[in-house]
Structures are given as C-alpha cells and as structure tokens.
Amino acid sequence: MRVSIIVATALCVLTGGAAASDAPLYKTRDCDKEMVQMEMNLCASANLDAANAELNHVYQKLMSQQADPKSKDQLKDVERTWMSYRDKECAWEIGPQEDGGSIWPMAMDNCLQDQTDARIRELKSQLDCAEGDVSCKK
C-alpha cells in the first residue's frame, strides 16, 4: 500500500495533477520547492483549500443560473453526492492513514485536489453551454 501511495504522489507531483495543456483553474503554491514532509503536507493542504474555494465559486455561479427551485435543489443534491463520492474514492485510492505514514496527508490532499479539479472542469462546462444545447442543465 505504501509503495502505491508513493508512486501515486510522485505522479501527481510530476504531472502537477493535471495535463500540461490545461490552463490553471486557480492559483496554487509550488510544492516542489518544499523539502520537509511537513511543509509538503501544508503546501498540499493549501492547494486543496484553493481548489475547494474555486469549486465553491463555480458552484455558486452555476447555482445562480438555475431557473427554478427544483433545479437548484437537484444541483445541491448532486453536489453533496459528488463530495461524498470524492472523499470515499480518495479514501479507497490512498488507503487508511495508519498505513500511509507521514506522506499520507499530502497523498490524500493531492487526490482530493485532482478530483476537485475534474469537478471544477465539469461545472465550468455547464456554465459555458451554448443556448439550446440539450446536454446542459440550466
């Protein structure tokens, strides 16, 4: 389990958690400069906080575009369900904290950030829908 955490974390660090061609979704700290595990953990946590703030911003914007209370309730329910999924997916992927050592907080935060980045892109695609696009929920 530890080897998979280290490999997953290394891949996230090397790839920046997203494809190089993707535009930045929000401002992040450069965690590659950190040399002590505690500092790496704090940096990863700060980047997750930035991801969550951006997700909330995009979510609020999409919520304001919903035409009726039913749509707003559905979006709220979907987002709560997604957050539960994200947390459980990363808990499964990274494994229990007691098996992860001092790198576990960074690995967990990187996983949560990657999942959150994907969700930001999904919600932004809904914001940018063209009028009449039936795949969009507005």
Image: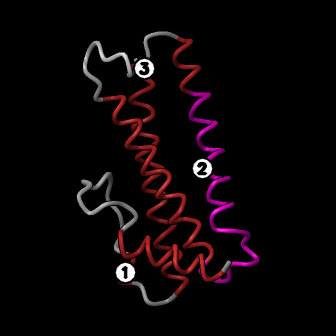
Q: Is residue 32 above or below residue 36?
A: above
Magenta span contains residue 99: yes
Q: Nearer the viewer, residue 60 or 134?
A: 134
In this picture, is 1 found above or below 59? Answer: below
Q: Which mark is residue 86?
A: 2
How is the rendered protein coloured?
Answer: secondary structure
In the displayed structure image, the side of residue 56 where residue 26 appears, left or right: left
User: Which residue is label 1 attached to?
Assistant: 32
Coordinates of residue 26 in the picture (x, y in percent):
32, 54
Report the Cα–Cα distance between label 1 and label 2: 25 Å
Which quadrant does the C terminus fall into?
A: top left
Question: Mark 3 Cα within 10 Å, few/some/many (few <14, many 20+)?
Answer: some
The amino acid type found where label 1 is placed reads: Asp
- Asked which secondary structure carries label 3, the reply is loop
Residue at the image position 50 percent from the left and 53 percent from the top: 115
Task: Indicate yes or no whether the magenta region holds residue 30.
Answer: no
Mark on residue 68?
none
Comparing labels 1 and 3, the label whose residue is closer to the camera:
3
Residue 31 location (% of width, % of height): 39, 76
What's under tag 3, amino acid-wise? Answer: Lys
Identify residue for label 3.
137
Tag 2: residue type? Arg
Look at 73% across and 69% down and name the residue there: 96
**Disc on the earlier residue, 1 or 2:** 1
Left or right: 97, with 133 as reference point: right
Give the dominant element type of the magenta stretch: helix, strand or loop: helix
Quadrant for the N terminus, please: bottom right
Q: Residues within 10 Å of mark 1 (few under 14, many from 20)?
A: few
Residue 105 horizontal side relative to residue 8, left or right: right
Disc 2 crowd, CA 10 A, few/some/many (<14, 14-19, 20+):
some
Q: Residue at x 46, y 78 (%)?
A: 10
